Image (cartoon, rainbow, N blue to C red):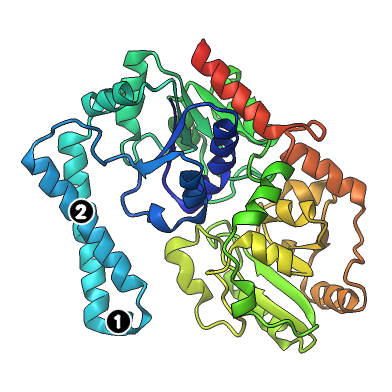
Amino acid sequence: MYLFFVRHFNDIDHITPIVWRMSRDDYPVAVYCLNPRYDIHNDYRLLFLAKQGIKVDYVHNDFGQKSGRLHETMHSLFQRSFALKKGLSSNDEKCSSIRSRLLGQMSGIFGILLYKLTRRKFYDSSWAHYVLEKTEARALCFDHVMPGLFVVDAFLKAAREMSIPVLSLPHGIFLYTNEVTKAKSTDSRRFSKFNRFDYIIVPNRLRKELLARSGVTKEKIFVLGSARFCNEWLEQNNKIIPRMIESNLTNTGKLKLVFMPSKPRCRIDVERMHNTIEILASFSAIEAVVKPHTRTGREKHVFSNMPLPNVSHILTPELCEWADVVLVIGTSVITEVLMRGKPALYLKYLHANTTLFEELGACWTIHDEAQLKKALLSLQSNKTGVPYGEENAARFLAEIVYGGGSDKDVLRGYEQFIVSCASH
């Protein structure tokens, strides 16, 4: 069995295509969620995999090992705590109550503490050893996760003892060309994050070079392109995404625009970004919406009380399909925008980083608010008129989606690599 471990929305985006392809080619695969707080039962991609007959479950659920009444009780309690927090959070009417908000916060804190105690007492390398034996694991595939998170460390130890290869797969696309992109982006952190994995897969050479400079052994870093943004998965994903545009956004005939900013901690000028949102709201001939980055997390307050609709609840692929033009800062969403042939406006003036797509001229680079206004007026007259050439976009996509090559079978490349690692 080839085991894939997921934990958040983003890594599921990038790992699902690989699991789907391997299952379709009759390789035995299973997906286990490391994060007890993540709702696997309401994730459309995991539901899709389950409908294909693929095992999808939480890694903490029973594998037939009898750990005793104490473990059963603690396991049940942290699951119930997270379920209660989710139930309260999803009910807007209840969440308006201070009492309900506090109850939700307390449930979450209690669940985390109880989970950590349970992990320390029961989810050690001997437990992981048992799981790997029970599943007849041939290879373990994580995302680019820190070994100290969840039960990753336990599986790394057990896999090493059992001589089972462990791979680290991409959970995003690295596009920054400068060294320091955010406060935690350091060589020592990258080294400790990747050094214990046997094989590290990256979408592009830019990421490989950065990891190698951080001290990670270059010989175990492999460039395979992007499973998430390859044509095969874009077409399949388009068939299964839950459609929400029709019930949430009107079709007014105006220029449809989505602004997808990066995480605020990625050296974003937040005040100027708010000013940009005000500018977008002032254009009466434009229907504009904002979708904050899915990993915004604790910084989500930055997007409170905006004069534009916050469409966090609508999936990015559907927004890219709906939009006439997409505005980005440093997010990899630009990859899907260009794959769809849509105009991509890069608001360079909103952050202190540099990107591969600006260096390759694969976007409309906007240097200030005045240029943004001119670009929007131009797109109102001609929705497809952009100053960058198709050949520049093609060069960028070749590097990012196809790992520097041509239009190759990306998912087959991932499949063959994982299978070959297991056979060594």
Q: What x and y, as percent, mark residue 134?
A: 29, 24
SS at mark 1? helix
Q: Number of marks in the image? A: 2
Please indicate, yes or no, whether residue 127 appears anywhere in the rendered image.
Answer: yes
Q: Is residue 47 above or below residue 15?
A: below
Q: Residue at x 73, y 61 (%)?
A: 348
Indicate the quadrant where residue 281 lies. Answer: bottom right
Q: Residue at x 69, y 33 (%)?
A: 410
User: Going by the image, does 327 lie left or right of 418?
Assistant: right
Q: Which mark is residue 78?
A: 2
In-front residue for pair 370/73: 73
In-front residue for pair 392/209: 392
Please indicate, yes or no, whether residue 350 appears anywhere in the rendered image.
Answer: no
The crowding category of the residue bearing disc 2, from other C-alpha atoms within 10 Å (few below 14, some 14 to 19, many at least 20), is many
Sequence-wise, which precedes: disc 1 or disc 2? 2
Q: Residue at x 33, y 28 (%)?
A: 155
User: Going by the image, does 256 lie left or right of 185?
Assistant: right
Q: What x and y, as percent, mark residue 235?
A: 71, 49
**Looking at the rendering, in which quadrant would you find the N terminus?**
top left
Name the residue beneath numbered marker 1: 94
In-front residue for pair 165/292: 165
User: Going by the image, does 393 lie left or right of 122?
Assistant: right
Q: What x and y, as percent, mark residue 221?
A: 59, 24
SS at mark 2? helix
User: Going by the image, does 328 lie left or right of 391?
Assistant: left
Alpha carbon separation for disc pair 1 and 2: 22 Å
In-front residue for pair 289/42: 42
The crowding category of the residue bearing disc 1, from other C-alpha atoms within 10 Å (few below 14, some 14 to 19, many at least 20), is some
Q: Is residue 341 above or below residue 16?
A: below
